[in-house]
Image (tube, grey):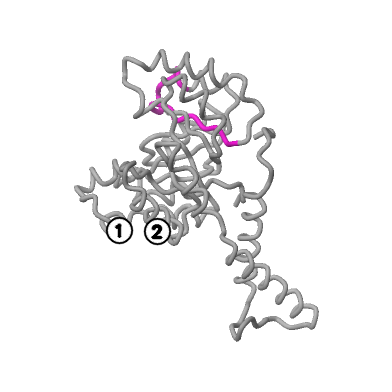
Amino acid sequence: MSTRPRRSMLYVPGDKARALEKAKTLPVDSIIIDLEDAVAPDRKAAARDAIEQAVSGWEKRHCELILRVGGLRIAEDFALAARLPLDGLLLPKVESAAMLAEAETRTSLALWCMIETPLGVLRAGEIAGVSSVAGLIAGTNDLAKDLHARHVPGRAPLLPALASILLAARAFGRAAIDGVYLDLDDAEGFERDCMQGRDMGFDGKTLVHPSTIDTANRIFAPDAGEIERARSIVTAWDAARAQGLGVARIDGQMVEQLHVDDARRILALADAVAAPRNDSAA
């Protein structure tokens, strides 16, 4: 699985020219240009024009660039994608591998899948197993609606679905991204949501406003304590292996290969987060 940071994935409405222009200056890991929920039906054509004008010169940038199409069979969206310097396409309401097979006939870009229906959750493993899939994104608001679930602190009604999405992504080495938090006035609630997603194992969070980027970037990055611990594990393991030992000990705790693998993942992510963000090719 890639160690490319995806701590923050910001939705930007496709018909908002100023927002599109501002987006490329933000310290976000991924930009998702939205042609689905964020754009009214009578604004779709204008949005495509605005996107093409704003994005055509983005060959070099500091972040990943993804287009969320309005639907699997909207030919104009796929035609637009073919003309833009994108890293991937986000497909809404993915519910089967067959839907992805159809998408693959329209694009060679990496596919991102919104898992936002009960059927999508039940088939998340089938979906994640498709080779063109880069990651799964939890569509928590649509999912809550379909489940008739209440929006409560801690998201207890959604945890089984979130865990299923995460398990499917990890089983096939895909990225797993948590859903949005819509109450922009509740900074504490947003931070709790991020921490819960991080503790579950998600790589990052989808966002709806630039003001939340810094919090997501901080919470989904390894902190200083995690980095120090990971370095200690790798150092102790290397020393043990040099002595012909199959295990190591740190502060009385046994260290095995699985701990070393996770420590190296943390260090690789920390290095990727710390790398200069100076308009290198995506």
Residue marked by disc 1? 154
Mark 2 is on which residue type?
Gln
Q: Earlier in the sequence, mark 1 or mark 2?
A: 1
Q: Which residues are magenta?
A: 63-77
Mark 1 is on which residue type?
Gly
Residue marked by disc 2? 196
* Residue visible at 23% across and 44% down in the picture: 146
How far apart, in angstroms, are the residues tagged by discs 1 and 2?
A: 8 Å
Quarter of the figure with the C terminus: top right
- SS type, badge 2: helix
> Where residue 129 sits in the image (x, y, percent)?
50, 48
Relative to the observer, which residue lies in front, 279 or 92? 279
Give the mark count.
2
- Label 1: how many residues lie within 10 Å, few (<14), some (14-19) or many (20+)? few
> Where residue 42 sits in the image (x, y, percent)?
32, 15
**In the displayed structure, does residue 13 sit left or right of residue 3?**
left
Disc sitting over residue 193 in the figure: none
